[in-house]
Image (cartoon, grey):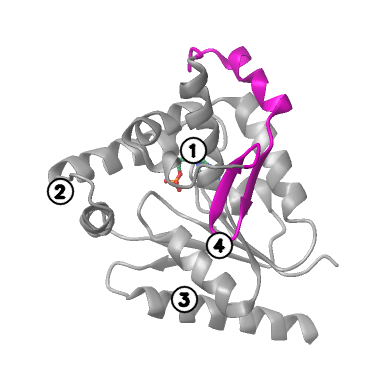
Amino acid sequence: MPGYKLAIDGPAGSGKSTISSLIAKKLGWTHIDTGAMYRAVTLLAIEKGINLNDEASYRFLESTYIHYDLDKIFIDNRDVTEAIRSESVTNNVSLVASMPYVRKQLVDLQQKAAKNGNIVMDGRDIGTVVLPHADLKIFLTANVEERAKRRYKENVKKGKEAQISKVIEDIVIRDQKDSTRKESPLKKASDAIELDTTYLTIEQVVNKIIELTDKKESNHGV
Ligand code: DC
């Protein structure tokens, strides 16, 4: 069964993963956080001690099983959900995600995972590259201060040390790297609907997207 494909893209801290996960739970759909997959590759590359700039060193991916399920990410069945949020992973993930070989491996996995059933997939290139024929494409934005505030609160909740100015700096650097890289940069698809979430609550964004999903579904029936 092909199912409904909902693509959600946007910059760091725009709320993509939280919102996608809630939509999936409400609708009983499958959620795939593709950022978590790039983070898992980064974690493994750091653990293996490879030269992160050397594309050929990522061949280990051929014999690695990366898998996202129910808000958890696994490398060869090891749960790395917490480990992928470390500072070293966050600082290096943009570099790893800029490697064409890494992207090709992960995009293949993502397209296979989206083949059957109703899917909400979030990332940077879902509407442009991974699911160019998605039924609905959303591009989430929010101003940098608001995105940093959200990340800061998350960090504090997790007991991580955080400084708002450092969080802003990290987000600006990552936005810049993600949107200027050669390979599949962060970009709004021409047919995506842009939603600025700066002044919206998570629930408002979730409900708005579900409303748009309903509209698209009823259009299909016409
Ligand atoms: O969503 P996130 O912050 O967990 O994503 C981590 C990094 O992965 C982000 O800096 C860019 C990269 N990424 C990507 O290049 N393509 C995707 N589809 C998802 C994430």
Q: Is residue 178 on the magenta stretch?
A: no
Residue 39's mark?
Answer: 1
Residue 98 showing in the rendered view: no
Dot 2 or dot 1, earlier in sequence: 1
Q: Position of residue 103 (x, y in %)?
A: 62, 33
Residue 13 lies left or right of residue 84; in this view the side is left
Dot 4 or dot 3, earlier in sequence: 4
Q: Secondary structure at mark 1?
A: helix
Q: Position of residue 101 (x, y in %)?
A: 64, 25
Dot 1 or dot 4, earlier in sequence: 1
Name the quadrant containing residue 219: bottom right
Q: Secondary structure at mark 3?
A: helix
Question: Is the residue indicated by label 1 positioned so its CB lies within 8 Å of ligand 1?
Answer: yes
Residue 168 lies left or right of residue 92; in this view the side is left
Q: Nearer the viewer, residue 199 or 109?
A: 109
Q: Amino acid at mark 3?
A: Val
Classed neighbour count for the residue bearing mark 2: other residues with Cα under 10 Å, few (<14), some (14–19), many (≥20): some
Q: Which residue is mark 4?
A: 192
Residue 71 showing in the rendered view: yes
Q: Nearer the viewer, residue 123 or 142?
A: 123
Q: Nearer the viewer, residue 17 or 64?
A: 64
